[in-house]
Amino acid sequence: MVRVLSPMEDAYGQELWAHYNGKRSFEIVERDYGYFDVSLGPELYFSNYEWWSEMEKKAKLRPLINRYELLSKRIKTLKTWINGDGYDYELKDSVRLMEKDKRDVARKIIEILSNDAVYREACRMLGVKDSVEPAILTVELPLHLPITRLKGLLGYTLDKNKGRYNHKLNGHITALAVNLYLNAKKHVNVLDKAVEIVDHLPKEKAIYKLELMTLKALRKTYLLTINNQIFDNPTGR
């Protein structure tokens, strides 16, 4: 049998109920080692993504990014099997379901970062809109590093860092570059610079050039955002 707590017994529930009804509420936090203080209240539990700190956003994004990458890997594997064997074994239905899940996860990632200054500016500089790849790169790339270090991290060196580079991040930046390449071929929602690269270089070299362009845009956007914050002109990050 379930017993309903009385208001005197359910202090936390009363705090949330008061906040829901527009009343100011808080709680006394007490620890075994003697510390106690007044909490900031339950606003955080009802806050929108844009109010979250960077740490909170990353904690929310990490499982979503993991799921996005897992779905991408499985979809690629299944498509390889289907194309290689010539028999789909009804796997195409599974691929369609996973692709739908992948789109849903991508939307959630973009929603969380929709007000992030680096992400918004990077999308503007690259000529893309609501794209999940720059969202993931914004979170995962250590953009505080010099551009030469970032190139090494992604394998953009003469010896590809002897294979010791971050293959996952390289995959994300390649996926974005391929998307830019396809859009440039169609002349749809793309920068003139991307069109110029695609029109004058073979496919493989053009995609590589677009990857470097993407990396430089992300790094530049990060530096501009940091400088804006330093000069008391916050841009939302």
Image (cartoon, grey):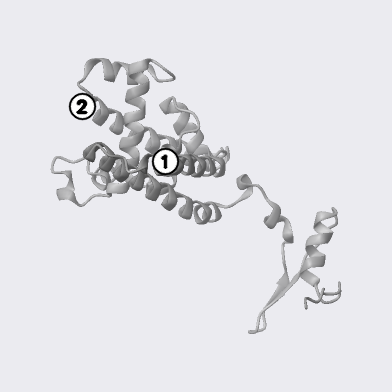
Image coords of residue 223 (percent x, y): 42, 39
Does residue 223 show up?
Answer: no
Name the residue rendered at 29%, 33% in the picture.
211
- Label 1 Cα neighbours within 10 Å, binned few <14 / some 14-19 / many ≥20: few
From the viewer's perspective, is 100 left or right of 14? Answer: left
Which residue is identified by label 1? 93
Which residue is identified by label 2? 205
Image coords of residue 186 (percent x, y): 36, 16
- Label 2 Cα neighbours within 10 Å, binned few <14 / some 14-19 / many ≥20: few
In the image, residue 86 above or below residue 183: below
**Amino acid type, residue under disc 1 in the picture:** Asp
Quadrant housing the C terminus: top right
Name the residue rendered at 57%, 52% in the picture.
53
Image coords of residue 91 (percent x, y): 36, 43
Residue situated in front as seen by the camera: 223 or 10 = 10
From the viewer's perspective, is 174 left or right of 227? Answer: left
Name the residue rendered at 20%, 52% in the picture.
164
Q: CA distance from mark 2 to mark 1?
A: 35 Å
Query: Quadrant location of residue 177?
Result: top left
In the image, residue 126 above or below residue 30: above
